[in-house]
Amino acid sequence: MTALTLNHVNKTFGKGIAKVEALKDVNFSADQGEMTLILGPSGSGKSTFLTIAGSLQTPTDGEVLINGDDLRHLSAKKREQLRLNHLGFVLQSYNLVPYLTVKEQFKLVDKVKKSGNLSASQLDDLLKLLGIDQLVNKYPDQLSGGQNQRVAIARALYPNPEIILADEPTAALDSAHVEEVGKLFAQLAHTQNKAVVVVTHDLRLKDYADKIFNITDGVISQEK
Amino acid sequence: MFLALKEIKHEKLRYGLVISMVVLISYLIFILTSLAQGLGSQNTAAIDTWNIKQVVLNKDSDINMRQSFLTTQQVDQLHQGKNDAVIGQAAVVAKHSDLPQISATFIGIKPTQFIYKDMKVIKGHKPLTDRQLVVDSSFETKRYKLGQWIKLNSLNQKYQIVGFVKNAKINISPIAYGRLSAWKTISNLNPNLAANALVTRSKHYKVTDNNLKAYSVSTFINNLPGYTAQNMTFEFMIGFLMVISLIVIAIFLYIITNQKLPNYAVLRAQGVPAKTLVISTIMQSLILVVSGILIGALLTWLTSLVIPAAVPMTFNVPVLSAVAAGLVLTSIIGAILPVRTIMKIDPVKVIG
């Protein structure tokens, strides 16, 4: 089932000589049960693509559908609820609250999303899988970059979203952990029927992807 | 509340400094308010104990009892019921050879009228003759004793202290109560003058003499020499401190909130409603300010235990509570200022 669709999406910033076309007639779809990789260099439009797909900004024209809902017809509040209930973001900047321990990062999710989150045993399994089950009482500044990134991944998966959008999730990881994260995303897609979309320039993740797109100067094309 | 408390717990030094600032501001405001209350009550303490509603003065007195003189004929024409009392006021210097001089106010009263009758003597008894006085308890702290004979001004005549009363002060000056007949001697006035004023517990005292006028007690108090100027000085100081504290708290919260914007942006991207972050910011400011005020109140209470009796401070709990409520209100206003910034957070700026 298609979870995320972008049809003829364009995004333009500025006017006149300052005009920049960040996305040009982008057509894209991500299905549940698949891991999709979007590869591109810096400045290619990857982050713009991700923020539009994640309902954080609106395209200049074109339509974005999440689980069949056209984002153009949703209010800001509805889009907020959609992000909370159906989307999981894994960001380059770790998305962790610095004054909460690892355990409390999940407690915060419980405070704003009262139901539908992973159970305690599912969370334990996830933390073990990511190798961070011994770090639950640590603050983000007590963790390494790689550990922070793995906690951020767990934090994004905890609300049990159908769609996972990851922005350079392996930027701070060594090769061993890149392999773990690649396997984890593929496993989540295949065993838990998630639609996983990863934007990255890390070619090491190609081995785990079901579909691969390349993005250059705002133009997207399918490689695999 | 969860985010607010966790952040305070984790950032102890930063929020400890903010609380310290609130402690100092609230302590200063509490002490100033107590001082204003203390000085204010020293101006009106005696008037408050009389529990009067109106004061009849000469129309040309500029609402000043010392400048108001009532003739015998005028006093005789005034209705003098159980709620009315004629009084004479004179500035005196009390002297005793072995003791420091005291600048005081002599208040002459009639033993048949309510001020004399309702007088609560804490030591000794009420004056029974023209030569006897009941004085404010501050005389006792300056080593004046019961039975002592003192001189008033440069008069040859001596007066005996026969009693002490509490809160007998007018215009910051301690009162020596005596007979109205003694006031005539002390004042050395024209024999035709019988009193300075008539004070009454009646709200609607009728004055028929065109040269006299009944003033409300609040008008009379506001015209006590220096009273309004002194009160306004304190009110302005407290008001400006409140405004300054509002600005300081708002600036602190604005800076702290701005530092948290990247985190808030990520939380907004994850679907955490702006309302949750706004409530967290306001709750955090309330926790900081209420903690600061409570510590400030504790310090004020400790100060009240050690402050010398000579310092005119009154720790009036309802007034201090109102001041504390004002500070809490200013903190809420201060916390609301960065709310717009939180509402306008653009998660894209953090991600992109």
Image (cartoon, helix red, strand yellow):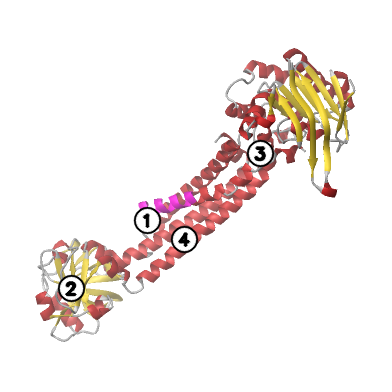
A158 w.r.t. B85: above or below: above
Q: Which residue is mark 4?
A: B239
Do the dots labelled 4 and 2 sit on one chain? yes
The circle drawn on residue B264 is 3
Name which residue lies at 82% across and 32% down.
A172
Name which residue lies at 79% across and 32% down.
A9
Q: Secondary structure at mark 1?
A: loop
Q: Secondary structure at mark 2?
A: strand
Q: Which residue is mark 2?
A: B87
Q: Which residue is mark 1?
A: B315
> Can residue B283 be seen?
yes
| Residue nearer the viewer, B316 or A217 | A217
Q: Which residues are magenta?
A: B317-329
The circle drawn on residue B8 is none
Q: Tell me if A131 is positioned left or right of B64 in this view.
A: right
Query: How far, Cα to Cα, is label 3 from label 2?
Result: 71 Å
Disc 1 marks which amino acid?
Phe
Q: Chain of mark 4?
A: B
